[in-house]
Amino acid sequence: KQLKKYFPVGKSLFGGNKGNVQAVDGVDLTIRRGETFGLVGESGSGKSTIGRTLLRLGEKSGGEVHFDGVDIYSLSKEELRRLRPRMQMVFQDPYSSLNPRIRVGDAIAEALLEHRLADKKESRELVHEVLELCGLGAHHADRFPHEFSGGQRQRIGIARAIVLNPDFIVADEPVSALDVSIQAQIINLLNDLQEQRRLTYLFISHDLSVVEHLCSTVGVLYLGSLVEVAGRDELFAHPLHPYTRALLSAVPIADPTVRREKMILQGDLPSPLNPPQGCKFHTRCPLAQEACRQERPVLRDVGSGHLVACHLV
Ligand code: SF4
Ligand code: MG
């Protein structure tokens, strides 16, 4: 609810003023149990910051986060530690989060032992189980991270999250660093795990075509604000916000009989340090009008849960 995360910046040797990078600027969103909520936006739009803030990995600047009815920012350290296994994160680059000198089995078991969720023997069994479940084979447990390919490492990253038996996983660009052929395998794995383990995902991506395969609901983020939220089929069939329409017009379609409008974005993403007044998208919007420069549109329901923030819709 109205989640905000600002990063203060100071003056530098090279000038510039003090200010706040408004990475997340009043975001309202609901992720329902068992669904995959896709969060899409360009790099720098605040996607990862939302993901981290939802898990209370760091502090927020405003708003509230409720997980299964619990206001997680009101929890004590100890209460948060006990909740932690239920909310996990999968990163874009699992290699950087794996210690090169620690065997992957031990890396996966680490959190189990740390949270005292299992003793050594149980941990070994659970690690073997999740390695199998993630398509790697239990015999890989004594190997080192460098012995694996990018796709296999992402399987290890997922195994590491899954072993704690979480309810909710934030997957932050989990396939963006992988070859397209491998991307499909990892997406299928995430889908299978969701069914078997009744998981809920926040799936973060800059790639709408990836989101289309996996997500039941999609939120489009621009400079720290949601500009459109809708069910997947609705969003892809009837995108309403000019930014979503521009993003979609850049996604290739395999079927030559389907035509999509061409909508070209002007310029680059503005700095979140001084976001534009009025509609933050007005500096790049092909449909911008005078009112757009003055007044910020709010996200509102335009029918059956399709939310849009645009004066023209
Ligand atoms: Fe474009 Fe105006 Fe709509 Fe913003 S409010 S998206 S500038 S038309
Ligand atoms: Mg990111």
Image: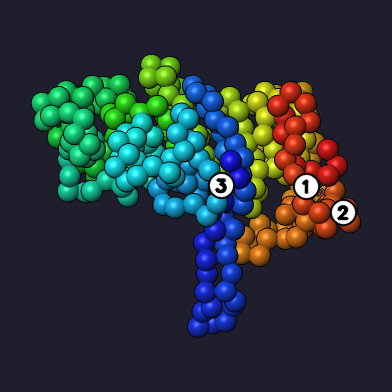
Q: Earlier in the sequence, mark 1 or mark 2?
A: 2
Residue 64, numbered label: none
- Say whether residue 217 is left or right of residue 9: right
Q: Amino acid at mark 2?
A: Ala
222 relative to 274, above or below: above
Q: Which mark is residue 291?
A: 2
Give the residue at mark 1: 297
Q: Can residue 265 be seen in the rendering of this structure? A: yes
Residue at image x 52%, y 69%? 9
**Percent of width and height locating residue 139:** 17, 26
Rendered location of residue 219, percent (x, y): 62, 36
Disc 1 residue: CB within 8 Å of ligand 1: yes
Res 63 label: 3
Q: Nearer the viewer, residue 14 or 61?
A: 61
Kind of element beneath mark 1: loop
Q: Residues within 10 Å of mark 3 (few under 14, many from 20)?
A: some
